[in-house]
Image (cartoon, helix red, strand yellow):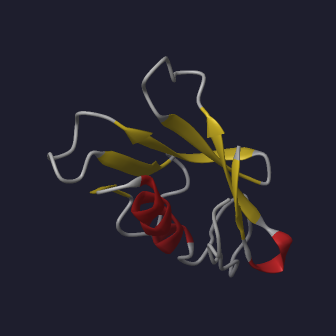
Amino acid sequence: MIVGAMSDDTKLILKRSSLAHAGFDDFDVLCEGELVGRIYHGKSGSGDKPWFWGLAYGYHKDRAPTHGYEANREATMSAFAKSWRREQRGPLGPGGYMVWLTAL
């Protein structure tokens, strides 16, 4: 499990997905126990950006972009967090801003 420290003691957590299988990096992104997105290494991106990230349905409103492709997992986590930091609406409440500080 990989944890990104967040402001106000809120964390984004990467947890190996149940969809992951041998040789395939696939992670669920959790915040306060809720599934808020997905990050995986696959063949859907271009050759130089094989890592995909996407916000889960219901967490993408008023955020842009809601998905993308990056060169490595660290860049993918950063892109996810940048989108996630947008103003929160919904389950986490209005005005909640997130900052991804580190990945272990």
Query: Would you place residue 34 above or below residue 94 in this image?
Result: above
> Front-most of 58 and 46?
46
> Front-most of 98 and 5?
5
Q: Residue furthest top?
A: 22
Q: Residue furthest left?
A: 47
Q: In this view, does 82 lie to the left or right of 70?
A: right
Q: Is residue 80 left or right of residue 18?
A: left
Query: Would you place residue 68 above or below residue 95 in this image?
Result: above
The part of the image, by quadrant, that contains residue 44 is: top left
> Front-most of 19 and 87?
19
Indicate the position of residue 20 as horizontal and vertical percent values: 51, 23
Numbered-mark total: 0
Query: Would you place residue 94 above or below residue 50 in this image?
Result: below
The part of the image, by quadrant, that contains residue 99 is: bottom right
Indicate the position of residue 82 as horizontal and vertical percent values: 48, 73
Tell me the quadrant of the picture where the C terminus can be found.
Answer: bottom right
Residue under the image location 37 percent in, 55 percent down: 72
Residue under the image location 59 percent in, 30 percent down: 17
Q: Is residue 95 left or right of residue 69?
A: right
Indicate the position of residue 49 as horizontal and vertical percent values: 23, 53
Query: Would you place residue 29 above or below residue 21 in this image?
Result: below
Residue under the image location 15 percent in, 46 percent down: 47
Q: Residue furthest right?
A: 9
Residue under the image location 34 percent in, 47 percent down: 51
